Image (tube, rainbow, N blue to C red):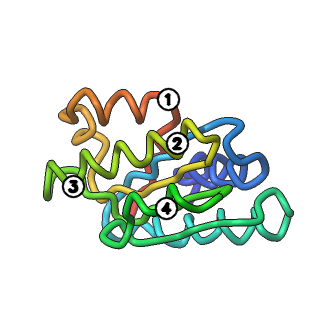
């Protein structure tokens, strides 16, 4: 819908110029908000435009620090856990920070509302403030 055009524009900008702006791109929305489709659209567009050669799109529960062993242009993490397991979340955040420092574009989805972002700890907030948060509606 019209309210989601901002998120769509950010996704296109990420696909057009990975790691140049909006890194990380954080997509926030409820379970029916089509967050996963937006991640796949980023991957497909970047590969089609030739702005990325290596893209990894992975559910958060399969995302590990091993991704830093691979040369990746874009890493897309679907369903990032903010509260489920604080130790795992912290480990994932450190991995994402390493990817960011290496010049890899990161985009991730979070299943929460924008009001929930205010309660995040400093490490999460610091990482997200480097990029942009796009809220999409169900």
Local crowd at mark 3 within 10 Å, few (<14), some, or many (≥20)? some
Local crowd at mark 2 within 10 Å, few (<14), some, or many (≥20)? many
Q: Above or below — where is 102 with respect to 109?
A: above
Specify the quadrant that holds the C terminus.
bottom left
Q: Give the residue number, with chain letter if any, for mark 3.
A: 88
Q: Give the residue number, with chain letter if any, for mark 2.
A: 24
Residue 128 falls left or right of residue 114: right
Q: Is mark 1 in CB contact (under 8 Å) with mark 4?
A: no
Specify the quadrant that holds the N terminus.
bottom right
Helix, strand or loop under label 4: helix
Helix, strand or loop under label 2: loop
Q: Nearer the viewer, residue 129 or 3?
A: 129
Local crowd at mark 4 within 10 Å, few (<14), some, or many (≥20)? some
- Closer to the eye: label 1 or 4: 4
Looking at the image, which residue is at 52% across and 42% down? 24
Helix, strand or loop under label 3: helix
- Which label's residue is closer to the chain start, 2 or 3? 2
- Which label's residue is closer to the chain start, 2 or 1? 2
Residue 32 falls left or right of residue 50: left
Q: Give the residue number, with chain letter if any, for mark 4.
A: 67
Q: Nearer the viewer, residue 84 or 87?
A: 87
Q: Give the residue number, with chain letter if any, for mark 1.
A: 130
Disc 3 to disc 4, C-alpha distance: 15 Å
Disc 2 to disc 4, C-alpha distance: 16 Å
Looking at the image, which residue is at 64% across and 59% down? 72
């Amino acid at each position: 819908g019209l309210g989601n055009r901002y998120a769509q524009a950010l996704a296109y900008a990420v696909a057009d110029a990975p790691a140049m702006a909006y890194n990380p791109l954080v997509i926030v929305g409820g379970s029916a908000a089509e967050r996963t489709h937006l991640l796949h659209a980023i991957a497909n567009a970047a590969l089609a435009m030739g702005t990325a050669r290596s893209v990894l799109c992975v559910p958060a529960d399969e995302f590990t620090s091993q991704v830093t062993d691979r040369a990746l242009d874009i890493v897309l993490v679907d369903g990032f856990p903010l509260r489920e397991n604080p130790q795992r979340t912290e480990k994932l955040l450190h991995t994402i920070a390493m990817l960011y420092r290496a010049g890899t574009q990161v985009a991730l989805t979070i299943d929460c509302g924008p009001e929930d972002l205010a309660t995040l700890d400093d490490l999460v907030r610091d990482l997200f403030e480097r990029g942009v948060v796009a809220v999409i509606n169900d």
